[in-house]
Amino acid sequence: MALLSVRNLHARVGDKDILKGIDLEVGPGEVHAIMGPNGSGKSTLAGVLAGREAYTVTQGEVSFDGQDLLSLPAEKRALAGVFLGFQYPVEIPGVGNLHFLRTALNAQRRSRGLEELDAMDFLQLAREKAKLVQLDTAFMNRSVNEGFSGGEKKRNEIFQMAVLQPRLALLDETDSGLDIDALRIVAGGVNALRSKERGMVVITHYQRLLDYIVPDRVHVMAAGRIVRSGGRELALELEEKGYGWLGLEQAKAPKEARS
Amino acid sequence: MSTDTLQELTRKGYSAGFVTDVEADTLPPGLDEDVIRQLSRKKGEPSFLLEWRLKSYRHWLTMKEPRWQAVRYAPIDYQAIRYYSAPKQKPKKGSLDEVDPEILRTYEKLGIPLHEQKLLQNVAVDAVFDSVSVATTFRDKLYKAGVIFCSFSEAVREHPELVERYLGSVVPYSDNFFAALNSAVFSDGSFCYVPKGVRCPMELSTYFRINAADTGQFERTLLVADEGATVSYLEGCTAPMRDTNQLHAAVVELVALDGANIKYSTVQNWYPGDAEGRGGIFNFVTKRGIAHRDAKISWTQVETGSAITWKYPSVILKGDNAVGEFYSVALTNHRQQADTGTKMVHIGKNTRSTIVSKGISAGHGQNTYRGLVKVLKSAQDARNYTQCDSLLLGDKCGAHTLPYIEVKNASSQVEHEASTSKIGEDQLFYCRQRGISQEDAVSMIVNGFCRQVFKELPMEFAVEAQKLLGVSLEGSVG
Ligand SMILES: Nc1ncnc2c1ncn2[C@@H]1O[C@H](COP(=O)(O)OP(=O)(O)O)[C@@H](O)[C@H]1O
Ligand SMILES: [Mg+2]
């Protein structure tokens, strides 16, 4: 059975339709890549799945592990095991990064009937997971994302994912704004978290990331729809020919990466 | 403070809102010279004090209630207020056996145990019930260190020379309308004197509890740190829920002599009124300290209660190198109004002041920061840094920042930074996406916003203040 099953999903912001009928099945252990030009609706899809309230779902269904995902508020989805790696991680001044993460982890543990971790046990866990993305402890005591570089923010997202161990990870442009070294570190972290039980949806504008995180399936989004799906060769084909090849209006070569 | 205490204090809604049934010795409502004479006689006061009260009263009669502050309330009928209400008990002897058990239970419920076995670790408490001090803990230990910590009435009896010398020396009776009223009718409060060179061996704390209805609350706190002395002092405040407003017009005077250091912290949680704005305390308080040469006075306040808060804990930086600090969190939810801030008056050379104000508005709350930085001609090389941040939760509340700066000496540096932000949907979503509930997320973000101030509070009280904010904000978002 699919871990995540999206059927004919339509969503809008205000009176603007953005998602216009998305179908997507992600099984446990699978990694799916979603590519597409800017503005095609990738972040919107991730946001709708995670429960961002700015979007209104007008049609369609989403089931996660057999549950009706759309009926749950954002925090319940998180507790059920949905994790969103943010394209733009948010700063929370004055709230310690570790305090934040421990509060989150303990909320999740409570909801699963597990005992909360005390500060010492948590610190040990955090230290271990931080190694995965090469973050040092000094950084962990700063305020959540405040004054972090672009790369530190993205590594922090993967660090949080490593601690929270979600069932489904939606990673929204985890590669954007990273230089090649940072990209390798982040991709290494993601690969280390691949597992038989976990599904992943990796959203990216560039094929470059997929050299490091090799997907099982690739989908191309354009104007709120998935217009092509295929194996990983689809990503390579896209790189060669650009999105224009698909006959899309916002045709731009996805080759070049920002740094 | 124990975890149980915190839980008790932070139960849903306003947990301190109960009424205690005690017999009270009260004067009928109304105010004239006779009432003041009776009050003074009941307390067995020396004549200098009665004279001072009468002078204050006569001056008060010539004054007008101020209306410049950015708060709104119906006129107060000063003849409808009862100016004296004391729980009936034998005169205090220092033994708790003589305190009405109902009153002991009240403090117990509030998490302030006064029984010898359960005393707060290393915190001496003066418990003030309806403006009358009912018990002071750890007196012996303080006495050995030479520290005088007792009720104001007791200080008048035992140390009249200190009272006469310092009373009104920082806040003269003519200072303002409410200070004049307080000077005429104050009933009790706390007194503290730390002798030369002594570092007070424990935290001192006054816990104010209003119980009686229709009674005005006029306490006076006088704290004197002699040369080179150090003291940290904390006050906490709660009141029952009543649907009429009650006036609380206290005066706090701090004297820091040469090289002395006073840290004064307040966690104010007077009953704020209900969601529609019925009831609650009018908290019109005058707080001021005078810092002599090389002395330091630091005010830290966390204000979550009261229907209306109107106060400006201030420092007169009189001596050279004196330091003044003001760290404040003021939260207004529902229909609460706060007009609060500070005054830093630089007189001495090389004086320094720091102001950090964090205003949080939720519901229909209105929050005004009003601050004055005044550098006199004599204050060569004075420096001030002011930071005012406002956080809005929702779109029906308001935040206002009114800094006044008067500089008469060109060598001084005055810096001011201000910001207003809304609690972000993005921040909330980020927290919730990690599994943190909306309420916990709000309280976490707000606590983060206040961190600079909380870290100035003594440890136990910082925890209490954080929880208090959480409770005060319940249901304020989404
Ligand atoms: N909160 C929003 N308000 C208005 N328009 C939005 C909002 N979020 C997304 N959009 C619009 O929806 C479209 C898809 O955006 P997005 O999902 O961010 O695309 P992508 O992530 O693929 O670049 C864009 O045209 C964008 O401007
Ligand atoms: Mg995007």
Image: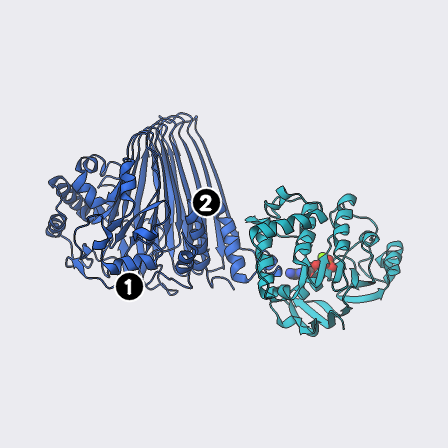
Chain colours: A cyan, B blue
Residue at point 86% right, 56% down?
A: A242
Q: Badge 2 local density, few (<14 within 10 Å), some, or many (20+)?
A: many
| B190 shown above or below A15 | above
**What residue did someone put label 2 on?**
B453
Please give the chain letter of the residue carrying mark 2: B
* Disc nearer the start of the sequence (2/1): 1
Which quadrant of the figure shows ligand 2?
bottom right
Residue A185 in sight: yes
Q: CA distance from mark 2 to mark 1?
A: 32 Å
Residue sitting farthest toward the front? B117
Residue nearest the observer in this picture, A7 or A245: A7
Residue positioned 67% across, 67% down in the render: A12
Image mark for residue B294: none
Q: Secondary structure at mark 1?
A: loop
Residue closest to the eye, B141 or B343: B141
Q: For the residue marked with disc 2, what is the amino acid?
A: Val
**B243 sits to left or right of A132:** left
Q: Quadrant of the N terminus of chain A?
A: bottom right
Q: Which residue is mark 1?
A: B19
The answer to whether residue B176 is visible is no
Answer few, some or many: residues within 10 Å of disc 1's Cα (few below 14, many 20 plus, some between 14 and 19).
some
Left or right of A42 on screen, residue B342:
left
